[in-house]
Every structure is written in C-alpha cells, then in structure tokens.
Amino acid sequence: MTQRRQALMGVLARATLPELESALERFAPLPPIDEPRPAEVGLAMLRGRVGGDGAPFNLGEATVTRAAVRLNAATGVSYILGRAPERARAAAVLDALWQDEAVRFAVEEALGPVRKRIAGAEAATREKTDATRVNFFTLVRGED
C-alpha cells in the first residue's frame, strides 16, 4: 500500500494544474475540506553524494510548496517543487480522495491521462539519450 501511495504522490507532483483540476471535476461536489496546513511556500535543502555513495554535501536550496487537507477521515498531503499553492492544494485533495477505498479506482482512472503523459515524456527522453549513446569496446590483439 505504501508503494502505491508513493507512486500516486509522484504522479501528483508531476501533474499540471489543469490536469489536477480536470481530475477533481469528476468528484464534484466535494465534501467539506478542512485545511490543517494551508498551502505554503518554503525552501528545502538539496543534498547530494559524489558518485552516488560518497560523502553527502549540501547542493543548494529549492523552492517547495506543501499542503495538507482533511477530507472526511483522510488527511491528504502534497509537496510540489516550485511556487504552486493551487497545485499543492489540488494534489492534497486528490491524495485524500485516493485514501478512501470506495473512490480509489476512480482517482486512479482520473489520473490515467497524467500517467500517459509522464510515460510519454520519459520515453522521449530515453529515446534522445539512446540516440547519443556511445558504446566503447576493446579489440583484442592476436599476440596475447
């Protein structure tokens, strides 16, 4: 269940505001929404490692928008890179809706076009990368 929610949060973080609003329209009218943590913009420290396993170092800061909403008994949260309070709130509402098993499938279905767009963009990036890939090989001399 945790991995499925993590995957959902990844989709919500990459979705555009029109895509999120389109998905939310399917669930109108929404029940009353409580905002224990309204959308707020802040900074997050980015950490890196040389070679992926070296000593960690501070790379810099990134602007992040976070939001939390309570819908029925579920608390939805979201973290969005950049300044996007509307996107963060919409993503948090969809996260709260997803936690209700009765509408989980409908939320997944509403986010289908977003998943397709993300998969297409990743495939295009992979294709561009593969087109410029250089394969190195060593010829063996017969004297050895």
Image (spheres, grey):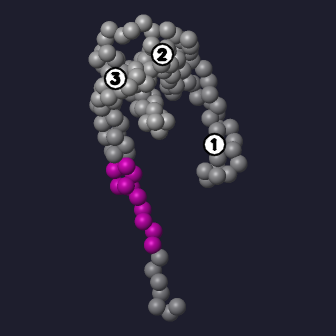
Quarter of the image holding residue 56? top right
* Closest to the observer, 13 or 101: 101
Residue labelled with disc 1: 48
| Tag 1: amino acid | Gly
| Tag 2: amino acid | Ala
Please give the range of residues in magenta.
Answer: 126-137
Label 1 CA crowd tier, 10 Å (few <14, some 14–19, many 20+)? some
Residue labelled with disc 2: 73
Nearer to us of marks 3 and 1 is 3
For the residues marked 3 and 1, what is the alpha-carbon distance in whole angstroms?
Answer: 38 Å
**Residue 77 sits inside the magenta stretch:** no
Residue labelled with disc 3: 103
SS at mark 3 in the image: loop
Image spot of residue 84 (x, y percent): 48, 19
Numbered badge on residue 23: none
At 62% from the left and 24% from the top, the residue drawn is 43
For the residues marked 2 and 1, what is the alpha-carbon distance in whole angstroms?
Answer: 37 Å
At 64% from the left and 31% from the top, the residue drawn is 45
For the residues marked 2 and 3, what is the alpha-carbon distance in whole angstroms?
Answer: 14 Å
Quarter of the image holding residue 61? top right
| Tag 3: amino acid | Val
Q: Is residue 58 left or right of residue 14?
A: right
At 64% from the left and 52% from the top, the residue drawn is 53
